Image (cartoon, rainbow, N blue to C red):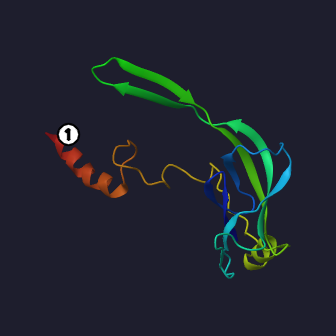
Amino acid sequence: MYAIVETGGKQYRVRPGDTIAVERLTAAAGEAFDLGRVLLVAGDGAETRIGAPAVDGAAVRAEVVEHVRGQKIIVFRYKSKVRYRRKTGHRQSLTHVRITDIMLDGASVADARSSAATPAPAEAEVITATEVTATDMPSSAGESGPPPEDVAEESAPAEAEATKE
């Protein structure tokens, strides 16, 4: 289940558990709030609900993780032949937000549909370093190592003739 929400003049595609960076919000760190402007709710074989402009009765629950400043952007203005140069910078204030739930008409749709639609994940097979050897892995063209068996057999008679001369 996913939703498209709008905040800070930008749109984000979110799922429960996602962490996104949005324009600075007034909520304090650790505080939960609702993103009320939900433009679309879809996924998991459910009926897609598209808003005009927003989906009625839809909200996305989120919690503030932290407030941060974005990466510095350098703005350099230059005009040729008139010795005009101005260098300034900017750092945007951001808020990291963790999406906790997607709500439709006051009920959580993300938890019910996602747990019923997707089975529990199977345990992944873990390969340790002792199980994989150098001979099991294919060698690339530039690597040195033992030659393949068929090449070693072809080169052996040629080496024997060269030593006889």
Q: Say which residue appears at 44% left-offset and 27% top-offset.
A: 76
Q: Residue furthest front?
A: 82
Between 138 and 84, the one lying in front of the other is: 84
The three-letter code of the residue at mark 1 reads Thr
Compare residues 156 and 43 and report the one nearer the observer.
43
Q: Position of residue 163 (x, y in %)?
A: 20, 39
Q: Quadrant of the N terminus?
A: bottom right
User: Pointer 1: what residue?
Assistant: 163
Up the image or down, 95 lies above or below 36; here it is: above
Q: In the shown orientation, is residue 48 left or right of residue 158? A: right
Question: In the displayed structure, does residue 149 sit left or right of residue 75?
Answer: left
Q: Is residue 82 above or below residue 133?
A: above
Give percent across and percent down for residue 103: 80, 70
Outermost top residue: 83
Neighbour class for label 1 at 10 Å: few (<14), some, many (≥20)? few
Q: Residue at x 68, y 69 (%)?
A: 54
Q: Is residue 53 left or right of residue 59?
A: left
Decide: is 54 above or below 87. Answer: below
Quadrant placement of the C terminus: top left
Residue 56 lies in what quarter of the image? bottom right
Marker count (numbered): 1
Q: Which quadrant of the figure has residue 51? A: bottom right
Which residue does the image show at 67% across and 45% down from the upper left? Answer: 23
Residue drawn at x 74%, y 50% as measured from the top left:
97
Image height check: is 135 above or below 89? below
